[in-house]
Image (cartoon, rainbow, N blue to C red):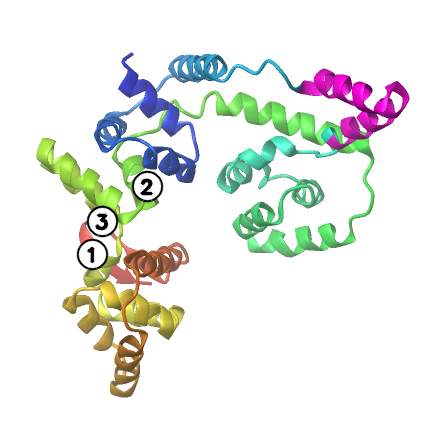
Amino acid sequence: MDAVRKAAILLLSLDKPLSAEVLSQLPREQVEKIMLEIAKVDDVTRDQQQSVLEEFDGHFKELVPIERGGINFANELLEQSLGKDNAGQILESVRQSMNSVPFGFLQKAGADNLLTFISEEHPQTIALIMSHLPAPLAAEMLSGLESSKQLDVIRRVANMEQTNPDVIADVERSLQLRMSSTFSQSMEKRGGVPMVAQILNVTDRMTNKGILESLEQEDAELADEIRRLMFVFDDLLKLDDKAIRSLLKEVENNQWAIALKGASDEIRQKIFGNLSQRAAETLKEEMEFLGPIKLSDVEGVQQQIVDIVRRLEDSGEIIVAGGGEQMIA
């Protein structure tokens, strides 16, 4: 297995935002090779993934040798500075702090991964897990639950009092065992063009544009296939007027004013044409009032609008079909 394929398998083992962050740190030439390999990936066996992860772990340990640190080193420092008796008290407090974060291993997993394991659990178990997670992650998990279960879980979180540590430990052990067992099989069918499209969708505009242009030179059909699975701000032109009007209800006027500053005339006309004459004139005036805006700010707001399109698609209000065909549910 060559290095490029190993890199592709490693990136596919990570959550998409983290994969995109890693790619942003690599030279363009390496990114192009890795993305081309990811697009070609079909099946990855459990053994192949395990081999890549173990090799990465070995290299990581070699590259970051830590000769100091750990609880014993902390104890030595405390004894030298505060004496043995005081050191013992402080060290015990440190140990308790280190061990007082139940379900800490879940904080590195994405909400989608967590939902796979807990969505069928009893609401009380879900509430217990959510109450030990950071608020943003817990919120993502909550939004992914069935609506019939969301209220029940929230009530249980609100009414939750102290929980027996043994119960927490049992739930934690069970979940960790299930996740580790399933994760080792999760790469048997991953990769391919859809994964490339998902990764590129969360990279910055300049990066994904450059990658697609380079891929087009090597394999025009592959580049076209990836583009068909992506939705970017310029694809607003592909939406019909009903879809645009649905989108207009969800996007604030000030967002449109910023986003359209960097848009083509065709997109501007598409938006203005679905507004009343008065609303269109108000939006044009707001755009003029803004003056010059940083390109990064414009692209940031455009990405927010793309995210809203995807949310509307997920809710069934807008169906963004392959090849640019759209329907309104």
Give the prevailing secondary structure in the magenta stretch.
helix
How far apart are the alpha carbons under marks 1 and 2? 19 Å
Residue highlighted by disc 1:
325
Q: Position of residue 254 (x, y in %)?
A: 37, 72
Q: Position of residue 195 (x, y in %)?
A: 31, 36
Please tell me whether mark 2 sits on a helix, a strand or a loop.
helix
Magenta segment: 70-97
Please tell me whether residue 201 is drawn above or below residue 33 in the rendered image.
Answer: below
**Nearest to N terminus: mark 1 or mark 2:** 2
Residue 26's image quarter? top left
Circle 1/circle 3 CB separation < 8 Å = yes
Residue at 19 percent across and 54 percent down: it is: 324
Q: Position of residue 271 (x, y in %)?
A: 24, 72
Residue 94 is covered by the magenta coloring = yes
The residue nearer to you, when weighing 208 against 326, is: 208
Residue 244's image quarter? bottom left
Please tell me whether residue 169 is drawn above or below residue 319 in the rendered image.
Answer: above
The N terminus sits in image quarter: top left
Tell me the amino acid under the disc marked 1: Glu
Left or right of 281? Residue 107 is right
Residue highlighted by disc 2:
198
Residue highlighted by disc 3:
322
How far apart are the alpha carbons under marks 2 and 3? 14 Å
